Image (cartoon, rainbow, N blue to C red):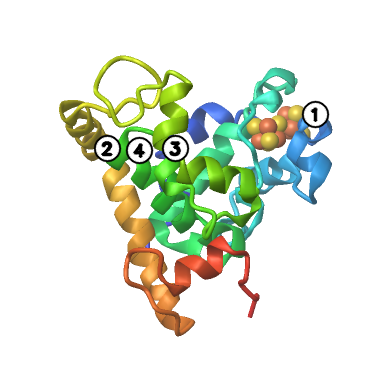
Amino acid sequence: MKSLYSELEKDVRYREGLNACINCGICTSVCPAAEVSDYDPRMVVDTVQQKNESLLLELLKSDTIWRCGECLSCKTRCPRGNVPCYIIQSLRSLSIETGLFAESAEGRKQLVVKRTVGDHILKYGYCVYIDEVRNEWYPEQGPVWEWLRENRENTLSRFGTSYRQTKAGTLRNTAKESLEDLRKIFDETGGTARFNKIEEFSAKKAAESGKEFTGERDEYFNMLNNGEEQEK
Ligand code: SF4
Ligand code: SF4
């Protein structure tokens, strides 16, 4: 197996994000994710700069790297010019490439992000699309949303949108050529390969946990999406 560090160092975000950390904790003090959870960017930066394979392995398997909101507040404040956010981005990429994301509860949710936001971009050209925001899947949307969705053709037309139309305006259909361009961009930039990795390693995890995995809104997906997962 290749050294995790040698793989991490190939990522330009890692190289740009890490100079030398003096453990001052300023990044943590300005970090909104640290405000609401036990997440600590100072700890992440200090861990990676130790260049300890075992510690890095544990980090890649942990919930920690999925808590950052990528707001980049840390970039503006670090006295050593480190960017904890870039380091986190490189760690997330490596976690997916190695399949280690499937070892943490937060990491496993990458499948939900891929099958909703990711797949919707490729299918509709929108990361969130009204047809897919069904109350059976998102009950927190409530009854007003349910009514709006059921009556969307009429209501959105009265709002002056271009829903399901090809003319200019909000919610218009994305042109077929544009969707094909999007697909090519994902293919060329590694997005498609990344999505495939998420599916591949999630399938293995689903098999381990005895959950149905069909590639759609299957039992494994629903368990993650509904927050029903029990840590074993
Ligand atoms: S980018 Fe991430 S680590 Fe940096 S301040 Fe925002 S949430 Fe915290
Ligand atoms: S602000 Fe910079 S130097 Fe200080 S703990 Fe965070 S990464 Fe390290």
Mark nearer the viewer, 1 or 4: 4
User: Which amino acid does the dot numbered 2 rest on?
Assistant: Phe
Residue at numbered disc 2: 186
* Residue pointed to by mark 1: 30
Residue 36 appears anywhere in the view: yes
Q: Secondary structure at mark 2?
A: helix
Q: Residue at x 76, y 44 (%)?
A: 40
Mark 3 neighbour class, 10 Å CA radius: few under 14, some 14 to 19, many 20 or more: some
Q: Does ligand 1 reach within 8 Å of label 1's beta carbon?
A: yes
Quick one: label 2 or label 3, which is nearer the N terminus? Answer: 3
> Reading the chain from its start, which is encountered first: label 4 or label 2?
4
The residue type indicated by label 4 comes to Ile
Evaluate if marks 4 and 2 touch, with contact meaning CB atoms under 8 Å apart. no
Q: Along the polypeptide, which appears first: circle 1 or circle 3?
A: 1
- Toward the bottom, the furthest residue is 210
Please give the residue where the numbered disc 3 appears in the rendered image.
152
Residue at numbered disc 4: 121
Gap between marks 1 and 3 measured at Cα? 41 Å
Residue at position x 48%, y 43% in the image: 149
Indicate which label's residue lies in the foreground, 4 or 2.
4
Between the C-alphas of marks 1 and 4, the distance is: 32 Å
Q: Is residue 119 left or right of residue 28?
A: left
